Amino acid sequence: MLTSRQKEVLYAIVRLYNRSAEPVGSRTLLRESKLEVSPATIRNDMVVLEGKGLLKKMHTSSGRVPSLDAYRQYADVLIHHHPELDLKLSEADLQSIKALTQSNNYSIFQRALLAADLLASMTHYTVTVFDQAQHIHSFQDFKLVPLDYNSYIATLVTDQGRIENDVVTLNFSLSEENIEQINQLMNQELAGLKLDEAYQRVRLSIPLMIQRIVGYQIDFTNLISKALNHAKSHQYYVSGKHNIFNLLDVNTGIDDFKELLELVDGSNQLFNLMEQASPEMEVLFSQDFLEHEVPMTFIRQAYESQGEQVAIGLFGPSTMAYERVIPLVNQVINLLKAY
């Protein structure tokens, strides 16, 4: 457990290092902060923070640099608005995002695009938007058809005419009577249910019902899951894509470079990152989702508007000014949620 002064020392080191990219020593910290203690006291606090894995000592300097855990703790404090940090957006930032309050005639996605362009322009980082509308489909018909001795095609039809197929391979063979019994059971039990309701029934109760008929449980959840996924429509946008180059330095390898470009170029990996965004802001680091470690941070947050799930994501350097960027993203999303 850190004392209030140790927290203040840690957060000041994070800010100073992010500003200068130079290890922070006790005298620099005292000169640039509001701390009113002796250099020896600061050095003792640094030793404690280093022992807790929050600071690292550089061999070329007596100063310290923040560790990944320090950044995680600092970001968490900013997200949850802890009282020890007084966060206020500048008047210039507030004026810039006022454009969002004048977008009454925009669609939900268009307003999110405007927000992404504003954030990319104000931060010079890469900003992504992921819009996911969930269309409600209901179960209409199910049919199981044999392919060979133990393989079958399961077909599902929704009330809006969408057809999904899935190949089911069993360790046993079904008789024609068994197939007909399963078809009847599925159509009776799922008739008129929304797909998410049908999924729960197919996952929990129907395998046991099938077992009573044929002696074995059969899993059709993959078929319903495919239908659910295809009922979602996605829209995707990247603003400031070339700002990703700002994350590169002389130590960036060719594999790191390729992975970054592929990531922001509509990759499935980024779709998954954006789809998993929650209504609470999250700060992720490259170690959380990339194969290669690069000095990058990803801030994401989702919000819902008129049945559409929208996520905003921002890629920036791990040394970004979190005390500005996190409140800025939060303020923008609060404005988007208001419409």
Image (cartoon, helix red, strand yellow):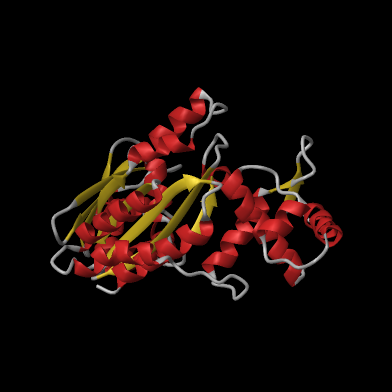
Give how far across and how far down residue 119 sits, in percent.
35, 54
Report the front residue among 319 and 202. 319
**Residue 243: image x %, image y %?**
38, 39
Residue at 83% across, 55% down = 43
Q: Name the quadrant containing residue 84.
A: bottom right
Classify the position of the N terminus by image quarter.
bottom right
Q: In this picture, is 236 found above or below 197?
A: above
Where does residue 27 sit, x and y in percent of width and height? 76, 53
**Vertical arrangement, residue 52 with respect to residue 315, above or below:** below
Coordinates of residue 220 in the picture (x, y in percent)? 36, 53
Q: State the image quarter where residue 146 is shown.
A: top left
**Where is 33 relative to 65, above or below?**
below
Q: Residue at x 55, y 46 (%)?
A: 318
Who is closer to the viewer here, 3 or 216? 3
In the rendered image, the quadrant that contains the C terminus is bottom left
Q: Residue furthest top?
A: 254
* For residue 250, side relative to residue 38 (left or right): left
Q: How many marks?
A: 0
- Locate residue 323 relative to residue 99 in the image: left or right: right
Residue extending furthest toward the front = 31
Taking 206 as reference, is 158 left or right? left
What residue sits 54% from the left and 36% below the top?
291
Q: Residue 83 versus residue 191: which sits nearer the camera?
A: 83
Can residue 192 be seen here? The reply is no
Whether residue 300 appears in this view of the structure is: yes
Q: Is residue 164 left or right of residue 302?
A: left
